[in-house]
Image (cartoon, rainbow, N blue to C red):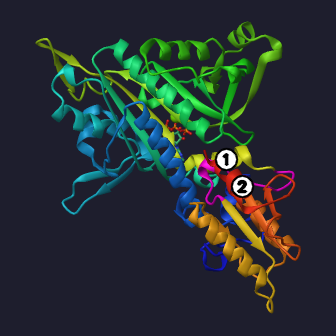
Amino acid sequence: MYFSKSFIPILKNNPTEAKIKSHQLMLRTGMIKQSSAGIYSWLPLGFKVMKKIEQIVREEQNNVGVQEILMPTIQSSDIWKESGRYEDYGEEMLRIKDRQNREMLYGPTNEELVTEIFRTSIKSYKSLPQLLYHIQWKFRDELRPRFGIMRCREFYMKDAYSFDISDDEAIYSYNKFFLSYLNTFKRMELSAIPMAADTGPIGGNLSHEFVILADTGESKIYTDKRIFEVDSTKTNIEKNSLSKLRTDFEKYYSVTDEKFNKNEFEKNVPDEFRLQTKGIEVGHIFYFGDKYSKPMNASVDYNGKKEFVKMGSYGIGVSRLVGAIIEAKYDDKNEIMKWPMSVSPYDCAILPIVNKNDNSNLEKATNIYNNLKNKNIDVLIDDTEENLSSKVKKFNLLGIPFQIIIGKNFSEQKIEFKEIDKKPEFISLEEIIKKIKNKSN
Ligand code: ATP
Ligand code: MG
């Protein structure tokens, strides 16, 4: 893509309405545009990042055997009346009437709808477990939408649901998601810690929030630093291996605000390991047994007996992750953003010095651009006539992890190449390709 032809509407200055760096950077680099309070359009740069995040989330759901479906955004109120949540949900739910005067709503979550889908099709315990997910827009009429897409009203979420015959089997399903979440965030180069959480309005008894440490986060967290060292790489999908993984994490005190107890914290965590800080919730998993299956009559036949299925639900804030990654990766001091390669909008940027009367640098840049494109490397080339230092400044905000700079000292064998936050090296195109490919794997 040529910068002059791209739709990346960069702002000269930080927008004053944005209070945290992710919101500032996303507006500044034209990743999103607000359309009304808490509702955003996603422009090409932001959309590319979000789609890459979505794909990682999808692959890691598939990896633990969860099946993808797609449920609608608009739901009927009937099923919510069955579960008893139509009243409980309150003003966060956007309620709509259709032309027949039927009460509809824009789904804030999908426990009811997925339970309805399940109960009409699955009749025998032999079809269990059923693990289903979708990635779909949600609407919650938050009282105070803020921080851009981090707490907005319309947002993109992966939500999954598990159906099992017994508590024991349901916990096994829960643990599969536990592992898949660790793997998902790791691929985005995030360290997300599972923390024991309150079950809140969804109800139930077992729950973890996955939280990334960040000063600007809205969740208060209390944790034992040793939890960062827990190794999940040797875990496989077998029942015992998964339950060992949970035990390994749960050895360390690690909770969010609602579960915090000062005495327990001080009793369980030696002084030098205590960490009390803030974080961003990027995922949340719940086990709630028959909370919905009972009122909604979702049961299976178990050797002639009717058993209500045991359910869990599992969310990831796909759109919130875009902001969360910025909060975690943006280097305030040097004003440099560096996207993890796995979610970066482009793999490499080419910055030629372009003069009105001399096309030669742009020609060299286009040559390299074509070569990289042939190797499936996604490149943004800045063909504008801005001077180099303002190009570099601009690209420091765009966060593309690799840069090729083409100026008057250009040489085929020693091309100026740098990782965005490192010193330049002078290497051949083959070596450049190797370095980019290495980072992509
Ligand atoms: P929070 O505690 O941040 O309000 P929640 O507990 O209400 O979130 P869940 O129902 O657990 O959210 O939703 C799953 C995930 O969806 C959350 O972990 C979060 O990443 C994301 N999410 C929830 N609400 C919003 C929102 N208003 N804007 C953007 N993402 C959100
Ligand atoms: Mg939550």
Sequence order check, earlier mark of 2 and 1? 2
Q: Residue at x 77, y 67 (%)?
A: 394
SS at badge 2: loop
Nearest the viewer among 208 and 78 is 208
Can residue 61 be seen here?
yes
Name the amino acid type tagged 2.
Pro
Q: Residue at x 67, y 75 (%)?
A: 367
Can residue 32 be seen here?
no
Q: Callout 1: few (<14), some (14-19), or many (20+) C-alpha neighbours within 10 Å?
A: few
Nearest the viewer among 173 and 19 is 173
Q: Give the label on residue 224, or none.
A: none
The location of residue 91, given as percent across then percent down, is 44, 46
Residue extending farthest top: 267
- Identify whether 96 is placed above or below 35: above
The location of residue 232, given as percent across then percent down, is 59, 22
Q: Main structural element of the magenta stretch: helix, strand or loop?
A: loop
- Quadrant housing residue 413: bottom right
- Identify whether 308 is placed above or below 379: above
Q: Give the label on residue 439, or none.
A: 1
Q: Residue at x 86, y 71 (%)?
A: 389
Residue at numbered disc 2? 401
Q: Residue at x 22, y 25 (%)?
A: 127
Q: Tell me where the magenta segment starts and ends, as one range.
A: 332-347
Name the amino acid type tagged 1.
Lys
* CB atoms of marks 2 and 1 within 8 Å: yes
Q: Quadrant of the N terminus?
A: bottom right
